[in-house]
């Protein structure tokens, strides 16, 4: 008789998990920790998980540097996140500090500043208040919550007519 935990948990062989993990990684860039967690959820042992991971890395399905760069660019361009928020998210995915630095070097600083400027312009149109200090404070807090650096926010705000 099966207990409830065994019914919920899929048990895959190492080969089945390898094939499934290959398509999981081919679909989009993944962090090693994401793949590791997925493999454990498929019922693999620690040794099998590490074997599959090393095969995925050897066959270039899994590349932590490529993931960090893609993640960084995606969150910046699609979500409008700043470096601080992106760095926190990458750390949660257990990406190493040197790889985060490599990913940040790929960011065009002019584009980064333009994204912040566009976000501030869009938010400015949403704020009803006319008081200069209230507007500036709200825009600053908004940009800060998006993960942009204080000095850059002040620089962009000071260059605008609010």
Image: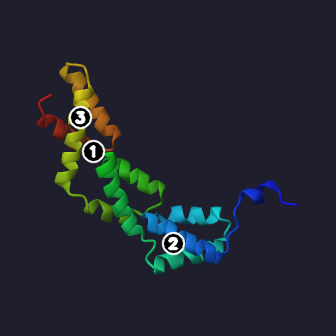
Residue 87 in the figure: left or right of residue 148: right
- Residues 75 and 22: in front is 22
Q: Residue at x 29, y 59 (%)?
A: 104
User: Which of the labelled discs sits on residue 22, or is there none?
Assistant: 2
Camera-nearest residue between 100 and 56: 56
Residue 9 shown left or right of residue 33 in the figure:
right
**C-alpha span from label 3 to label 2:** 40 Å
In this view of the protein, can residue 62 be seen by the observer?
yes
Q: Position of residue 144 (x, y in %)?
A: 31, 38
Residue 18 falls in image quadrant: bottom right
On-image quarter of the N terminus: bottom right
In 3D space, how far apart are the residues under numbered discs 3 and 1 (Cα atoms)?
18 Å
29 or 105: nearer the viewer: 29
- Residue under the point 37% across and 68% down: 66
Q: Name the residue tied to disc 3.
A: 122
Q: Residue at x 42, y 68 (%)?
A: 64
Give the label, 2 or 1, closer to the camera. Answer: 2
Label 2 packing within 10 angstroms: few (<14), some (14-19), many (20+): many
Q: Secondary structure at mark 1?
A: loop
Q: Where does residue 31 sit, x and y in percent of width and height?
A: 46, 63
Q: Which residue is mark 1?
A: 149
Q: Secondary structure at mark 2?
A: helix
């Amino acid at each position: 008789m099966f207990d409830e935990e065994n019914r919920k948990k899929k048990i895959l062989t190492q080969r089945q998990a390898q094939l499934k993990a290959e398509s999981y990684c081919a679909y989009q860039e993944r962090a090693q920790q994401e793949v590791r967690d997925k493999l454990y959820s498929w019922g693999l042992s620690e040794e099998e998980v590490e074997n599959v991971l090393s095969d995925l890395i050897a066959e270039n399905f899994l590349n932590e540097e490529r993931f960090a760069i893609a993640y960084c660019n995606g969150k910046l361009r699609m979500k409008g996140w700043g470096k601080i928020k992106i760095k926190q998210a990458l750390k949660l995915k257990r990406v190493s500090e040197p790889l985060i630095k490599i990913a940040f070097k790929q960011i065009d600083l002019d584009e980064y500043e333009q994204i912040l400027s566009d976000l501030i312009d869009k938010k400015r149109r949403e704020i009803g208040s006319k008081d200069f200090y209230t507007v500036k404070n709200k825009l600053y807090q908004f940009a800060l919550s998006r993960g942009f650096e204080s000095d850059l926010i002040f620089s962009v705000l000071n260059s605008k007519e609010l």
